[in-house]
Image (cartoon, grey):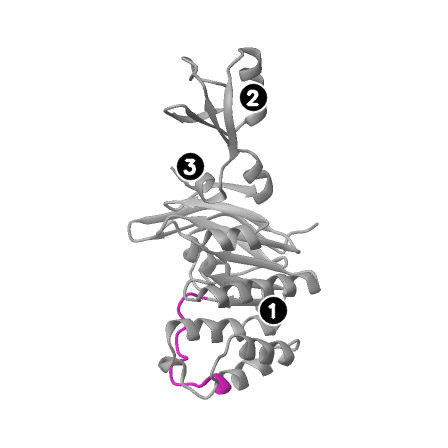
């Protein structure tokens, strides 16, 4: 299937920070999470996709159109929600809805009203007077109902309380199931990755670590506790400590244990958060 977003060797230098080259394809029907340490360039990459920052090299195309070209019709098909919204403080939620809704032909008023009620958002207060959590709830309630093909969210659950976070994730999953759509999000929240992401794109200090299918990644790491640790390095071994050994190739590791008659006391899958930490080291 033809990707909706194609990023090829994109790079950007900001002061002493170098992003890229980054290459990534976003296909319809998928949720891709950008994951990395603070300052890895995740938010910068989103701005480059939206042409809010100029590329120094490489290219980005959305629905076949270069994002820095004269034809900006692709923007009608994309919703971008940054971490910090600029220029909204003087407006109430009702004001913002009146400004935003007419711009989107597929605006879903029922979904907007449902989110406002579910997340308990006051529409009569100015945005700047709301708490960070309520600001985030209102921003998300003004993003999802636009019903664009592509939704780009920068840390969407960072200020949400636990019940609201679950409610929003449920809404996003439901929204994705209605038709072919694509979501890109950045997050540091393991539960977001576990519930939402199909693919993880790992970044470290501006460099790409790799793109991984989440379920395959989670299945590819095991921790073994052994009665006696082998004196030599085991095939697939990633690290060891005491009687514990972590493998990123369980089939090869277990075959070695069987062939050399090493007694395995226990074995467990690694949590996704731990796997990501290992990959980013």
Point out the residue furthest to the left here. Answer: 16
Residue 91 located within the stretch drawn in magenta: yes
Marks 3/2: CA–CA distance? 20 Å
* N-terminal label among 3 and 1: 1
Which residue is denoted by mark 3 in the rendering? 278
* Of the pair 133 and 257, the residue shown nearer to us: 257
Residue 103 is at least partly visible in this image: no
Residue 202 located within the stretch drawn in magenta: no
Q: What span is in magenta?
A: 82-95
Give residue 170's quadrant in the image: bottom right
Horizontal and vertical percent position of residue 17? 32, 49
Which residue is denoted by mark 1 in the rendering? 73
Which residue is denoted by mark 2 in the rendering? 254
Horizontal and vertical percent position of residue 46? 47, 58
* N-terminal label among 2 and 1: 1
Q: Residue at x 47, y 18 (%)?
A: 234
* Of the pair 76 and 244, the residue shown nearer to us: 244
Horizontal and vertical percent position of residue 178? 70, 65
């Amino acid at each position: 299937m033809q990707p909706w977003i194609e990023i090829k060797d994109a790079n950007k230098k900001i002061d002493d920070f170098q992003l890229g080259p980054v290459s990534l394809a976003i296909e319809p029907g998928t949720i891709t999470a950008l994951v990395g340490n603070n300052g890895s360039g995740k938010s910068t990459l989103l701005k480059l996709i939206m042409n809010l920052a100029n590329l120094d090299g490489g290219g980005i195309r959305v629905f076949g159109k270069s994002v820095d070209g004269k034809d900006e019709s692709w923007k009608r098909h994309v919703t971008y929600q940054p971490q910090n919204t600029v220029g909204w403080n003087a407006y109430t939620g009702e004001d913002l809805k009146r400004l935003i809704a007419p711009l989107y032909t597929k605006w879903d008023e029922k979904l907007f009203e449902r989110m406002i009620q579910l997340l308990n958002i006051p529409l009569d207060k100015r945005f700047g007077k709301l708490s960070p959590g309520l600001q985030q709830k209102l921003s998300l309630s003004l993003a999802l109902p636009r019903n664009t093909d592509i939704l780009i969210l920068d840390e969407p659950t960072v200020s949400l309380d636990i019940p609201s976070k679950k409610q929003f994730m449920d809404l996003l999953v439901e929204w994705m199931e209605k038709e072919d759509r694509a979501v890109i999000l950045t997050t540091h929240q393991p539960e977001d990755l576990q519930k939402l992401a199909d693919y993880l794109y790992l970044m470290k200090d501006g460099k790409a670590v790799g793109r991984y299918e989440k379920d395959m990644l989670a299945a590819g790491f095991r921790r073994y506790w052994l009665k006696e640790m082998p004196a030599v390095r085991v095939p697939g071994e990633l690290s060891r400590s005491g009687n514990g050994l972590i493998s990123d190739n369980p089939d090869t590791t277990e075959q070695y244990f069987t062939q050399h008659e090493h007694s395995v006391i226990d074995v467990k899958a690694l949590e996704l958060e731990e796997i990501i930490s290992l990959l980013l080291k």
